[in-house]
Amino acid sequence: MGTDAMNQPEPLRVAIVGAGPAGSALAILLRRQGADVTVFDDGRRPELLVGESLIPAVVPILQRLGVEQETASFSRVKPGVSFIWSPGERVSVTFARFAPEICGYAYNIPRPHFDEALMKGAIAAGARHVPVRARLERASTGPELVLAQETLDAAPALARRPPHLIVDATGRARHAGRVLGIPTRLGPRKDVAHFAHFEGFQWDDVAGQVLIARGRAGGWTWCIPLQERLSIGMVLNQDDAARLGRSPEERLERAIATDGWLTSVAGSARRVTEVATYSNYQLISERGYGRGWVMLGDAFGFVDPMLSPGVFLALRSAEVLADTLAPRPGRSAAPTAAELDSALAGYAATQEAMLSAWLELVEYLYDGRLLALMRAGRTWMTPRSTVIKRAVEQHLARHVGLLASGAATTSRYSRGLLRFMSRYGLRGVDPADHAIR
């Protein structure tokens, strides 16, 4: 080996366990920074995954990753969202209204195609793909967490030179958290979701517009138009779900049959997938990093699918972690253990803040405060409304849009404005009348 090669700075070596959106996005970004990246992924994917509807803040990340054009090729453009609280109570949001502060559109994606596009991007960027199910173990000395020997045997490069950092991107499986016995904070709701894809549906709404409706039997339902299919799902507490039927198929079928607007959309549609079931939609790890390891995306924490923040939070966590690990100016070597620990602490604090902000925003929808505020705002607008009243209504609507788009979900001003107005601006409208049970 030549002297120049021996003097080359050692790059950051990273082992990413899991190749969902968060893991693949991180691999792309770290490779661009010169890191040595190995991704472990056994390739197994369920037919359906939660997270089919994106929010506008995802689009700039897709552009940064270089995958927007491919994503657009198999996805449906999403112009906005409509919330249906009753047959006569509908609030429609169009993203273009808030441009240019946010992207004026998003996408509805078939998740297996989307995840595969990101994984291909990671491989094209130079990440090593090891097609095995990685196993983690608690270490007796040094780092808290290490790759098991059989996992290292499948990745000779790491067997010779262990990674500086192990990234748990295993999603809700939370591999690192389970191995280390790290507890989680659960949200107040204990809901279950059932959903499936349908063909032969009737769609009279704006193309790509996502519909969210308060369910008659409690909870809420969604309709997400894809290119050729419609994703229909329901989220409700487990007792209400049990009253609809014994199996996921019975429950979803009955929800469609007994809800007027769902019947009008999918009453004659044909289900073309199995009915997927997910539970526990609000969970955050008590600790998201340690010496030589860190959690990413859903492994760190996830929130309710209301408002569709899941994929954004996964991709944004990859962005934050990659930016945190970026080499300092004038230095390309791997960080010291102390520098790495400091970087991971900063990332974890940012991730906690993002998850907390989204949980707070989602709660405004569940407890009825957001819809009550929108309804109260309409009472401000009369033929004799002052310029000031109109300006306040527009200002509030803009900041609610920025919060829900992902562009300003952690903004202290936007969050403070919503808190203030939901406390003092309801003008006799009772939020309980608009709550989701």
Image (spheres, rainbow, N blue to C red):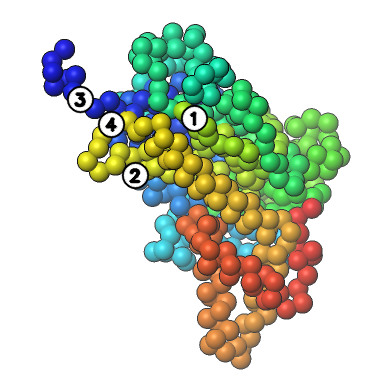
Which numbered dot is residue 333?
A: 4
Q: Amino acid at mark 3?
A: Gln
Disc 1 to disc 2: CB gap under 8 Å: no
Quick one: SS at disc 4? loop
Quick one: SS at disc 2? helix
Q: In this rendering, which labeled residue sits more in front, label 4 or label 2?
A: 4
Q: Residue placed at 44% from the left, 40% from the top?
A: 342
Q: Residue placed at 47% from the left, 57% from the top?
A: 407
Counting residues from the N terminus, which is met first, the one under dot 4 or under dot 2? 2
Q: Amino acid at mark 2?
A: Arg
Q: CA distance from mark 1 to mark 3?
A: 25 Å
- Of residues 128 and 262, which is closer to you in this image? 128
Q: Position of residue 151 (x, y in %)?
A: 48, 12
Q: Position of residue 412 (x, y in %)?
A: 53, 63
Q: Residue placed at 54% from the left, 60% from the top?
A: 403
Q: On the image, numbered disc 2 is attached to which residue?
A: 64
Counting residues from the N terminus, which is met first, the one under dot 4 or under dot 1? 1
* Vertical side of 64 occupied by 26: above or below: above
Which numbered dot is residue 8?
A: 3
Q: CA distance from mark 4 to mark 1?
A: 19 Å
Q: Position of residue 135 (x, y in %)?
A: 54, 16
Q: CA distance from mark 1 to mark 2?
A: 29 Å
Counting residues from the N terminus, which is met first, the one under dot 1 or under dot 3? 3
Q: On the image, numbered disc 1 is attached to which residue?
A: 291
Q: Amino acid at mark 1?
A: Arg
Using the rendered image of the protein, determine whether residue 193 is visible from the camera's viewpoint: no
- Of residues 120 and 294, which is closer to you in this image? 294
